[in-house]
Image (tube, rainbow, N blue to C red):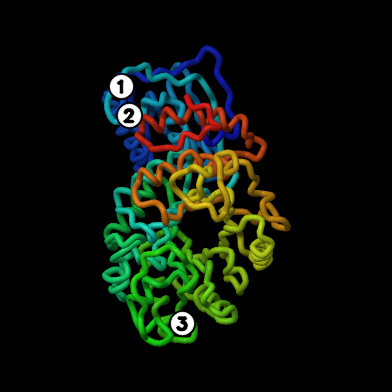
Amino acid sequence: MIPQPTAHQALADQTFALASDATIGAAGPALQQIAEQLATQLRRSTGFALPVQDGAGTITLAQNGPDELGAEGYELRADTDGVTITAATSEGVFRGVTTLRQLLPAKAHADSPQEGPWEVTGTTITDSPRYSYRGMMLDVSRHFFTLDQVKHVIDLISLYKVNHLHLHLSDDQGWRIQVDSWPNLTEHGGSTQVGGGEGGYYTKAEYAELVQYASDRYITVVPEIDTPGHTNAALSSYPELNKGDLPPSLYTETEVGFSSFTIDKDVTYEFLDDVFREVAEQTPGDLLHLGGDEAHSTEHSEYLTFVAKATELVVKHGKRVMGWHEVADGPLPAGSVVQYWGTEDPKAQVLAQKAVEQGATLVLSPANRSYLDMKYDAETPLGLDWAGLVSVEQSYSWNPATLVPGVPASAIDGVEAPLWTETVDDVSKIEYLVFPRLPGIAELGWSAESALDWASYRDRLAEQGSRWEVLGVNFYRAPEIDWR
């Protein structure tokens, strides 16, 4: 299983076998929806009817579990009589169902009927996460990905108990979310992408559908509007945002650090006020990411002025501020979350420490460990290498609690694996760079520190290959894993 559960124990001489007359029992609308999701998948792979009913069933989902396991914790028991998953919340039940899907044979993920048996070795599991934030970031600005493509990514990452999807929605190369008060952002700024392709953007209806799809899988969408740099698409769309009122051309290359909002114009903050308001209105999660990284063309004093004003606008619209670690150089509102993307860079570490001193918490995304767009090795055909080569072992073998010197473990919210898409223009390339590294980051965020062991993880990861084959995932067959 990945992530490794907190506690599990085999039940001797007990095996659960899913039979053709099996039922799935659940009480309440939320659990009915979870049960129907499970039934829909198992109907495809087994050919069984698997009716969903109120109360108990062959597989029973119940929201009467212990509160001490928290919102995502659950208990699971599989024996000859059936499977029972209990939790204090529907979210916890969903995490337990995710575990059950891993306990079933790999062919349970198939899209067409397969031959049985459909057995689960008898076991009891008590499980809850180490950290509350376990995320993946998908950059849809460098290359645009459609609603269905992002849904596919959501389906895959939900298998590993990831609970946040950070969408990088604006950058130099494209603006990807509809803003009614500034329509040219998408009509013009969203019209292209890296390499000169046609780009694209999410209408409000599409974004709402994406947010709901993620929510149905207990994943919170975190939208990012990158500021004050990484803003060429916006600057090209509206001349008044530029210093001299002359807009730059649209940009389809990959170098960064050249663009900046004008810090001393009122229109800059009128623009951000509108954008943050509309994005906040569309996003039920409590975080809004304002970027803040690589603002190389913004004077430092102006950058600090900007961060103070921009963070106020995020709070004004009812969201907590999230930003890359550079924003910690300025004053941060209460409840802010700073995303650390440094390696062993002392300056980045100091900024992370400064964030914590201000009362902010950290989400850790060290580029030389968790950036999914880095090459696995020198021969990898996709990806970049500016942060180093990131093998599967390298991406797994670090401890979030001790990554940044001087930062207490209590200040860590969790981990996130970003995928920047300079070299990624289709879903098969996403799959190749995300798998098999994403499950390891997910385990670092979920499993107890004492359970983190490369030798054990390596063996468990080897078993996931057969599931990805059934799912048709184009995963990288890392040579350090004995795939089976």
Closer to us: 40 or 415: 415
Q: Is residue 256 visible?
A: yes
Q: Secondary structure at mark 2?
A: loop
Q: How many marks?
A: 3
Q: Nearer the viewer, residue 474 or 29?
A: 474
Dot 2: few (<14), some (14–19), or many (≥20) neighbours within 10 Å? some
Asked whether, in this view, residue 287 is left or right of residue 474, the answer is right
Q: Which residue shows up at 57% across the image and 69% down it?
A: 327
Sequence-wise, which precedes: disc 3 or disc 1?
Answer: 1
Q: Secondary structure at mark 3?
A: loop
Mark 1 is surrounded, within 10 Å at the Cα level, by few (under 14), some (14 to 19) or many (20 or more) other residues, namely some
Residue 91 lies, in percent from the top left, at 45, 43
Q: Are marks 2 and 1 in contact (CB under 8 Å)?
A: yes
Outermost residue toward the top in this view: 13
**Viewer-side label of 3, 1:** 3
Amino acid type of disc 1? Gln
Residue matched to label 2: 110
Tell whether 5 sits left or right of 117.
Answer: right
Q: Nearer the viewer, residue 481 or 274?
A: 481
Q: Position of residue 1 (x, y in %)?
A: 52, 31
Which one is earlier in the sequence, the residue at label 2 or at label 3? 2
Task: Report if residue 281 is visible in the image.
Answer: no
Which residue has dot 1 on it? Answer: 114
Q: Quadrant of residue 112?
A: top left
Amino acid type assigned to the residue bearing label 2 in the image: Ala
**Residue 262: mark in rendering:** 3
Q: Residue at x 49, y 82 (%)?
A: 263
Mark 3 packing: few (<14 Cα in 10 Å), some, or many (20+)? many
